[in-house]
Amino acid sequence: MSEMLMLTSSDSIEIYRYEEKIRNSGRSFNWVLVRDTLRFLRKSKIRKSNLVSKYGLKLVTQYLNKLDDQEGYDTIEQVIIACLDCGDETNPKKLLEQLKSKFGKDSVRVQRIQALCYESNNQLAEALQIFESILKKYPSDALSMKRQVAIFKGQGNLNKAIQVLNAYLQIYMCDLEAWLELSSFHISYLSYSTALYCLEEVLLNAPINFVFYIKYAETLYCLGGSENYNSAIQYYTHSLELNSPTEMDKLDHPPTFLPAIYGIIMSIYSMCEEGHPLKESQLKLMEWAQNNLLIITKKYSSNDKLNLVKHFIDSTDIFNKD
Amino acid sequence: MSNNISITTESLTKIHLHSFKHHASSVNGILLGKVDKNSILITDIIPLFHTQTLLPMFEVAMIQIEKYCRDNNIDIVGYYHSNQCIANELEPEPIAKKIADRLNNELNNMCFLMISKIEVNRPSGLVSIDKIGSDWLKNRKTLITIDTTSNSEDINVILKRNLQNIKESQIYDFEEYLSNPTCDWLNKSLVL
């Protein structure tokens, strides 16, 4: 799910730049660069466990005194999670002991990390027990509830995961990530209408993020029917308003609105296939989308793609039909 | 109908690299190759998605893949999928069954493979999912052999080498092409 959020901002470009710098620093360990990269990753919540476990581990074991207190322990927590993600079990244990001695075994944050260690070792019952005991004392501890959802999802028990997630969302109605996760559960069960409801909450919470409008439109398309294709077109065009193709020349990276253009073409074509009459504005939109698709393909894609895209435009054409 | 399924080393490597690149998601893609009455040879793959597969972009991909196949004298022979969770590793998600059903209806003969662990008694790491009645169920007995005519290196050796060189970051699927048109979802220049 975080991949969806990454697409939106310049975060993905920035993390790429950090990674490049680290790669280019070669054998010398630039602790300032690593500290800044880890800081950025904590803020943007991008998942780069290989990077964090490799460089972060060195930072917290050899350069911990260079970091100020609070940041040092934040970084240790970040490195523990990254190491667990990479399947490392020995280093997290050592670092966790460090945290336990500083903050005590009863600290909620330390307990959560302990539960994560259990999770990674497949001791799910122990992990769930910890989260239950935390929730008894602090019934609205968001992170514990979310980990419960994650455990149930990992066990393949989607029904239970949906149950806990629904209970969580009763309390935290503005949690964008949670609504996205719930929508993805429903999409994997092919319950597209319920997924649409969740995506509507996502859109309410993040109305200027173009990615979610595309997601909503695609889910509408899955439901099918002319009315839904019609609505899908509106959401696709709204996402284009937020991620404007007219500024394409000013971008320093390739355009990111191909799903919207393809989606518009598919939706209009599907409406036409169902015999639904098209408005003048939709015909113009179709023509514009087809042209733009060709322009983007000629400018950014390799030559062999042009043939395939031309064929796609021909197959979904509504203008030259008999 | 049981098939003899054979897959080239390169295709197999690509499938595993795709799943390694998006290790926390479910990945899927289309298998290309040659098909006979009861044997299938997979010679290439097109990775498709690594988040949920939604219909419109899937259809966009299929239209372009069909044209690519016609132009290059190769057939669509199947579909590969990997679940997001290891817990129910070999039970296909509903969307995977839907896609497999659609391909099954359109093609004379096809295979549906799920990605699993490479082991001694499963050298390819793939398991065939067969249509039994109206459902898709795993069939561990279907043997999937690795076709080593163009590359006889052991799959474990190739994968290890590529993962150490972070080669998996260079395999692009259709979804990445959609967010960046410069990505080559045909992976033509990928050297393993």
Image (spheres, coloured by chain):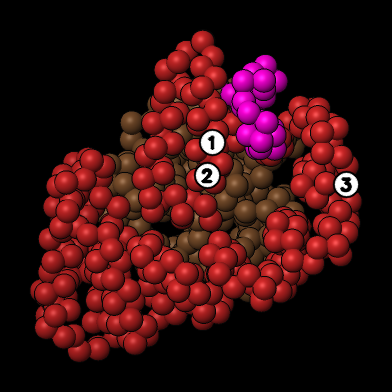
Chain colours: A red, B brown
Residue beneath disc 2: A43
Of B101 and B184, nearer the camera is B184
Q: Chain of mark 3?
A: A
* Disc 1 target residue: A39
The answer to whether dots 3 and 1 both sit on one chain is yes
- Mark 2 vs mark 1: same chain? yes
Q: Is residue B152 above or below residue B95?
A: above
Res. A88 mark: none
Report helix, strand or loop for mark 3: loop
Residue type at the position of mark 2: Lys
In percent of the image, x 24 and y 76: which residue is there?
A: A268
Residue A222: within the magenta? no
Task: Tell me where the magenta segment starts and ends, as one range.
Answer: A55-79
Residue receiving disc 3? A106
Residue B25: % across, % down: 57, 50
Report how far apart the C-alphas of labels 2 and 3 lie in the structure.
26 Å
Q: CA distance from mark 2 to mark 1?
A: 6 Å
Q: Earlier in the sequence, mark 3 or mark 1?
A: 1
